Amino acid sequence: MAELFSFDQMMLFGILSILLIIGLILRAKIKIFQRFFIPACITAGILGLILKELGVITLSEDQLKLFAYHLFNITFISLGLTARSDAPRTKEEKRKGFRGVLSMGLLISSVAAIQFLIGGLSVLFLNLFGFNLYPTFGFLVPMGFEEGPGQALSIGQTWEGFGFANASTIGLSFAMFGFLVAIFIGVPLAGWMIHKGYTSQKCVEVSTDFRTGICGKDMVKESAGTLTTHSSAIDSLTVHASLIGVIYLITYGFVTALETVLPPEIGEMFWGFFFIWGLLFAFILRNIMEKMGAGHILDDRLQSRITGWGVDMLIVTSILAISMAIVWEYIIPLMFMVILTAAITLFWVFYIGKRIWQEHTHERIAGIFGMETGTVATGLVLIRILDPAFKTPAATDLAISSIVALPFLFVMFNLMNGPILFGISLEVTLLIFAAIEIFILFLLKILGFWKKPIEKK
């Protein structure tokens, strides 16, 4: 008997859900997963990828990429709607806090520029040996490492429309390898810092719930959020989710309008930047609500739960969308760029971090490395290993610093399209990236961040 309705999307949702639950169980039961604090979504994604390649489960890669694209947009819109209500501080604390966020944001921008340079120079080098890589192949390195699977997928799919075959899978592969770098280099790195006594806080044993990923039934649990509407009218979660839908429609209308007035190739490119416009409109809506005295309807913890759900689903979906046949086809350039980028990123973050931070240096370095190879979540995991109670400002600064980096990242995201859209050669594009890097380092110097490193006694 034929099905009356299509269940493809719900079957996909069900499979992803099962994999996530299995990932959580594995984290709770297997010691090595606890030792490296491997998120359940990454375990779920890799397990699902293995099952898919073995033919145990059958999933459409096109459907997975479409699902991941929309999940990515949802998470960025949700981030924009999340209210930030920091406790009042003294002027001196605010000044130090601002400088901490600013320095982190500039370092994030600097790492992005260096990763673009690594990727582009690697293409020029490998093409000397007959690999014949697409000019922007290497620019997917920072998309995967610096930005994560959502951006890598979004940009990769857009570039496929311009003739870059398999760009989305290549971008997702860089993101997956980036996560592995963040975990299997970042966690031992944090352990080495503790062993050397580089942490600002006295090290305490990591809590059981942090290791296993499950809160005990007798422990005091953190609230997931508060109700801002009465359930007799509408559930608070419904309101928060509905606002995401409103922003999604506004963004869709805006990008559609842009496509009608801009040259076709540029208009098509804006669909790859849907997440940035969504984030912008979410910021605007949140600020309008606050000006109208309705900001209290948005609960930051409840909104963060939606964001967290979106990120978990996004990561497992993105890893599943990878085609191992394509990965194997490009395995040499992929591994060459991954190893080179991981090594230089680690050196770069350590070298500059020790010169711009005199306080909580290693907590900040660990957080930046985790974020610049994985996501903000992996950065926070590394910080928490060094600072279990989050007594240093490293975690807060890391979460906010991306806002400082946005102007630089927006310029670089447009510049990376130079060889495709604007007829700029890869060599000239790399020279501009080098100029951006020099400018960022110059800012660190003139703003008084760059100082002689303080050696640990």
Image: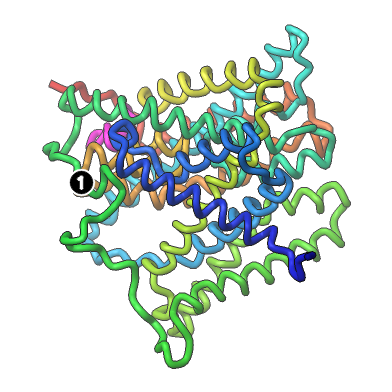
Can the viewer see residue 227? yes
Whether residue 397 is situated above or below residue 134 in the rendered picture: below
Horizontal side of 12 relative to 391 (left or right) equals right
- Comparing 134 with 181, the one in front is 181
Q: Secondary structure at mark 1?
A: helix
- Residue 227's image quarter? bottom left
Q: Residue at x 41, y 21 (%)?
A: 347
| Residue 393 place in picture, x, y as percent | 26, 48
Q: Residue 59 occupies which quadrant of the picture? A: top right
- Residue 417 magenta-drawn? no
Q: Quadrant of the C terminus?
A: top left
Image mark count: 1
Compared to residue 177, the image places residue 21 above or below, namely below
The relative height of residue 344 versus residue 69 in the rendered view (above or below) is: above
Q: Check disc 1 and give the amino acid type.
A: Thr
Q: Which residue corresponds to the image point at 84% horizontal and 32% vertical from the top-left?
A: 423
Which residue is depicted at the point 53% across and 66% down? 283
Asked whether the viewer can see residue 171, the reply is no
The one of 416 and 333 positioned closer to us in this rendering: 333
The quadrant in which residue 335 appears is: top right
Give yes or no for residue 360 being in the magenta stretch: yes
Task: Return the residue at label 1.
Answer: 208
Q: Residue 259 location in percent, x, y?
A: 83, 59
Quick one: which residue is furthest to the top in this view? 129
Q: Residue at x 62, y 51 (%)?
A: 68
Q: Which quadrant of the figure contains the N terminus?
A: bottom right
| Residues packed near mark 1 inside 10 Å, few (<14), some (14 to 19) or many (20 plus) | few
Residue 288 in picture, x, y percent from top left: 52, 77
From the image, give the main secondary structure of the stretch colored magenta.
helix
Q: Is 155 situated left or right of 362 in this image?
A: right
What residue range appears in magenta?
352-365
Q: Is residue 284 above or below residue 107?
A: below
